[in-house]
Image (tube, rainbow, N blue to C red):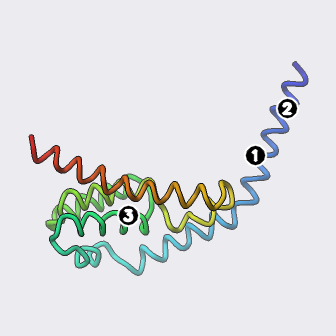
Amino acid sequence: MKKQKRSILLSFLKSGRSILGALPLIFGVVLLMGLLKAYIPTASIKNVFRGNVLIDTFIGALAGSIFAGHSSASYILGGELFKNGISLSAILAFLIAWDTIGFTHIPLEISYFGKKFTLTRNLLCFVFSILVAVFATLTLDML
């Protein structure tokens, strides 16, 4: 029993040191995201969409990848985009990419999981955000 408690304590301490070591990088990521959101307001994103469903879906996935953040904020942005006439597939791709991809998080993710895994995961998430958005929109259109 004592051996188990000791290993749990050592694991806890190791995890704590790892988190403390990552704090500067996490702070940098949060700062970069804040700067991006401050200089590129939501209203200017509307001007990027062209009206072509496939191109808009790609742009939505790309925008969601760049402006990664908390999911609750993405729903608000998605609602505003919908009110401004952006296609549903573009908004869905944006929401999915927002939650699954984050270009600003890549350095942190590489430091923990490695370059190959990080790039593969982000590329797959990007592709699937587009595919899921298109299929969901097609399904809704059939209903």
Identify which residue is drawn at 9% across, 43% down.
142
Decide if residue 101 is on the left or right side of residue 22.
Answer: left
- Secondary structure state at the residue bearing disc 2: helix
Counting residues from the start of the chain, the first of labels 1 and 2 encountered is: 2
* First reached walking from the N terminus: tag 1 or tag 3: 1
Q: Position of residue 40 (x, y in %)?
A: 37, 78
Above or below, 33 relative to 89 = below
Expressed as whole percent of the image width and height from the top left, the position of residue 124 reads 45, 55
- Mark 2 neighbour class, 10 Å CA radius: few under 14, some 14 to 19, many 20 or more: few
Q: Between marks 1 and 3, how big is the CA–CA gap?
A: 30 Å
**Position of the C terminus by quadrant:** top left
Q: Secondary structure at mark 3?
A: helix
In x, y percent, where is residue 42? 30, 72
**What residue is shown with label 3?**
64
* Figure check: 70 above or below 3: below
Residue 7's disc number? 2
Q: Earlier in the sequence, mark 3 or mark 2?
A: 2
In this figure, which residue is indicated by the disc labeled 1?
15
Q: Is residue 2 above or below residue 79?
A: above
Amino acid identity at mark 1: Ser
Q: Nearer the viewer, mark 1 or mark 3?
A: 3
Q: Estimate the spatial distance between the alpha carbons at disc 1 and disc 2, rounded to whole Å.
A: 12 Å
- Residue drawn at x 19%, y 57% is 88
The one of 52 and 4 positioned closer to us in this rendering: 52
Q: Amino acid at mark 3?
A: Gly
Residue ranking furthest to the top: 1
